Image: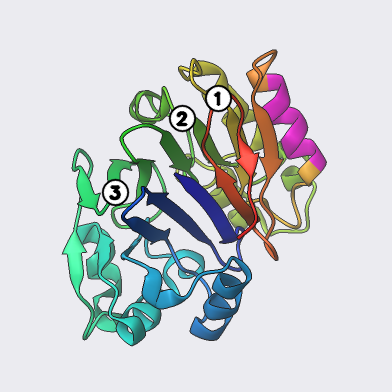
Amino acid sequence: MKFASLGSGSEGNALLISASDAAHSTTIMLDCGFAVRETERRLQRLGLQPDALSGIFVTHEHKDHVGGVFKLARRYGIPVWLSRGTFHAVRSDSSGVDVRFCRDGDRIEVGGLQMAPYTVPHDAREPIQYVATDGCYRLGVLTDAGQATTHLIQRLGGCDALMVECNHDLQMLAGSSYPASLKQRIGGAYGHLSNSTMAEILSALDKSRLRMVIGAHLSQQNNTPELARASLCEAIGDLPARVMIACQEQGFDWVELAHPELAVVEA
């Protein structure tokens, strides 16, 4: 099992998750906030063609997550999974696409992968995030959530790798030039996770299997990779877990989930 990011941030998000054995390979995309041509270009950088995708899973309807989903799915005949609430927010764009519904508590089997959606607090119609597994390893994803909940902490426990939101530094957001209403929205209970809140969540998780943490969805105005990394490192303490930061332009290359240590592999 391996995963890679096409890019992470307010200008577009897309994550690839892949599982393979001697006979079969399955690759899905989690969100697609890039235009089709840009998505194709970023996929090519990772050694993948769009027609190799077995499905696209959507977290919520905001443009930086769903902007390219239906055009890509329509062009290449890719099925799309999303919550009913998200579908009602974007249904006008979904004509001609194989749309399938999922919700918290489901277990969706796609080839060698199982996707488990779970609800999160965010200012969208029915936002969900996902835990992916190939039956051996678990990857948990958490972005676009405004606060910690017992439910999301439970769902992310016991993962081998986590890709988690470090959207903003509280002091940088407070001192930014953003209007007060936007600051309130970002820092509110249904906005985005700060470095410190994400560290609190990470501290509360079952980290017995954790070997990789990737900070994601960083604000280019209200955070820095150095601040996000420091916060994550403090939260994991002495655990032998690797910490990385996903960027908007490059995301990150394929990371293979393999013990005793995680390896970054070339496409």
Viewer-proximal residue, 87 or 124?
87
Q: How busy is the neighbourhood of tag 1: few (under 14 within 10 Å), some, or many (20 plus)?
A: many
Viewer-side label of 1, 2 = 1
Residue 179: x percent and y percent?
68, 59
Whether 159 is among the magenta residues is no
Q: Nearer the viewer, mark 3 or mark 1?
A: 3
- Whether 141 is drawn above or below 248: the answer is above
Classify residue 120 as left or right of residue 46: left
The image shows residue 38, relative to residue 198, as above or below, that is below
Q: Position of residue 49 (x, y in %)?
A: 47, 75
Graded by Cα atoms within 10 Å as few (under 14), some (14 to 19) or many (20 or more), the crowding at tag 3 reads some
Disc 3: which residue? 112
> In the rendered image, which residue does mark 2 sit on?
148
Which residue is depicted at the point 46% across and 42% down? 141
Residue range (magenta) = 226-234
- Choose between 197 and 185: the one closer to the eye: 197
| Relative to 98, residue 23 above or below | above
> In the rendered structure, which amino acid carries the disc numbered 3?
Gly
The kind of secondary structure the magenta stretch mainly shows is helix
